[in-house]
Amino acid sequence: METLVIAGNGPAGCTAAVYAARAGLSPLVLAGNTPGGLLTQTSEVENFPGFADGITGFDLVMNMQTQAEKFGARVEYESITAVDFRPAPPHKLTLSDGRVIETKVLIIASGAAPRYLGVPGEDRLRGNGVSACATCDGAFYKDLPVVVAGGGDSAMEEALFLTRFASEVHLVHRRDQFRASRIMVERAQNHPKITFHLNARIVEVLGENNVSGVKLEDTVSGEFSELPCRAVFAALGHLPCSEIFARAGIKADRSGYIITDGHTASTNIPGVFAAGDCADPRYRQAIIAAGSGAKAAMDAEKFLAEH
Ligand code: NDP
């Protein structure tokens, strides 16, 4: 029987592991399908306090993991394939290697995955112009033209953020109606650096080794055109990795984000806590995830002491 299992080893999972390991709980961390989480897919992280010269996402997460292991956390590169939440712990987890384990406490830190366009060229150029995080990668495109795809608040926010660096920001949206709030749309529309391309679908990301442009299809006329740019930011929403837990009874919102008690990391299931992007529809920043991981570990420790 495990005392504490942590699902995910991104900033939330690793920070939870550091805190729990230091509290002597010897947590088992399941690294899952994307070891290190989304952060490992960004290049340089310049906004995580404590690293004045920046650090790669991969190094940052590996440092956190090493720190957790130093205090007794155990990391296994398995994911959870099935969950059986009981009315009270222990909870039963089936792992990708077929093992079934029981745990008194589970911290879900399974992250969220950005939605991408799923068009030719996109996968191949990811990290070489294709990104889903303007905050992480925007500064690399100083004085260069960039494209943002999407029509939600994220797209508006990413477009506005990118005006700090890019020479031109082209917002490409497949409809002429927006999910984004009016104020955000107006702010973006009124910005001199931002050009809207509506009823336009990106059908291909162009470029050999780096992004050189996108191929657009006008959804009204059916005509194709090319728009030169050096980066494409997908701002198409995120998909929280919560499905397996929601199916087993964890409460999540309509978009799949796990609902935690306002002040703690508690979920609706006793002994199950959630931290990081899988429970954060709003911020999705490494530093926020790390902080919520610390909260979850402290809540887990308290739960174990009380039960
Ligand atoms: P949304 O789901 O609101 O918007 C996603 C956008 O991407 C939609 O315009 C959608 O188009 C488009 N899209 C999705 N899939 C594709 C595809 N395959 N090809 C082309 N376009 C696609 O996600 P957001 O991340 O923008 O927002 C999520 C939540 O976070 C919202 O509640 C939002 O209000 C909130 N948020 C708030 C902010 C703020 O208040 N400052 C900032 C950022 C987010 P379509 O409309 O045609 O479906």
Image (cartoon, rainbow, N blue to C red):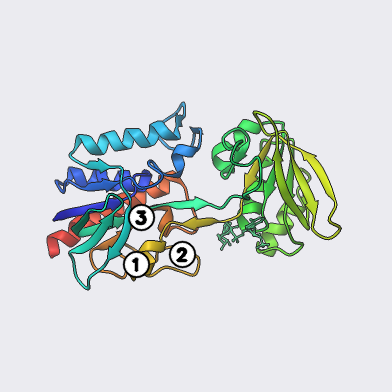
> Of helix, strand and loop, which one carries label 2?
loop
Q: Is residue 162 above or below residue 239?
A: above
Amino acid type at circle 1 is Asp
Q: Which mark is residue 29?
A: none
Picture quadrant of residue 124: top right
Amino acid type at circle 3 is Ala
| Residues at marks 3 and 1, CA–CA distance in whole angstroms | 11 Å
**What residue is shown at x 42% (from left), y 52% (from top)?**
111
Horizontal arrangement in the rendering, residue 64 relative to residue 178 (left or right): left
Q: Position of residue 3 (x, y in %)?
A: 16, 54
**What residue is shown at x 71% (from left), y 31% (from top)?**
143
Image quarter for ligand 1 equals bottom right
Picture quadrant of residue 295: bottom left
Q: Is residue 274 above or below residue 43?
A: below
Which residue is more in the foreground, 77 or 279? 77
Q: Which mark is residue 261?
A: 1
Horizontal arrangement in the rendering, residue 264 relative to residue 153 (left or right): left
Locate the N terminus by quadrant: bottom left
Sequence-wise first label, 1 or 2: 2
Q: Which mark is residue 275?
A: 3
Sequence-wise first label, 3 or 2: 2
> Of helix, strand and loop, which one carries label 3?
loop
Local crowd size for mark 2, using a 10 Å CA cut-off: few (<14), some (14–19), many (≥20): many
Horizontal arrangement in the rendering, residue 177 relative to residue 40 (left or right): right
Q: Nearer the viewer, mark 3 or mark 2?
A: 2
Residue pointed to by mark 2: 256
| Residues at marks 1 and 2, CA–CA distance in whole angstroms | 16 Å
Amino acid type at circle 2 is Gly
Local crowd size for mark 3, using a 10 Å CA cut-off: few (<14), some (14–19), many (≥20): many
Residue that sits furthest to the front in the current view: 98
> Of helix, strand and loop, which one carries label 1?
loop
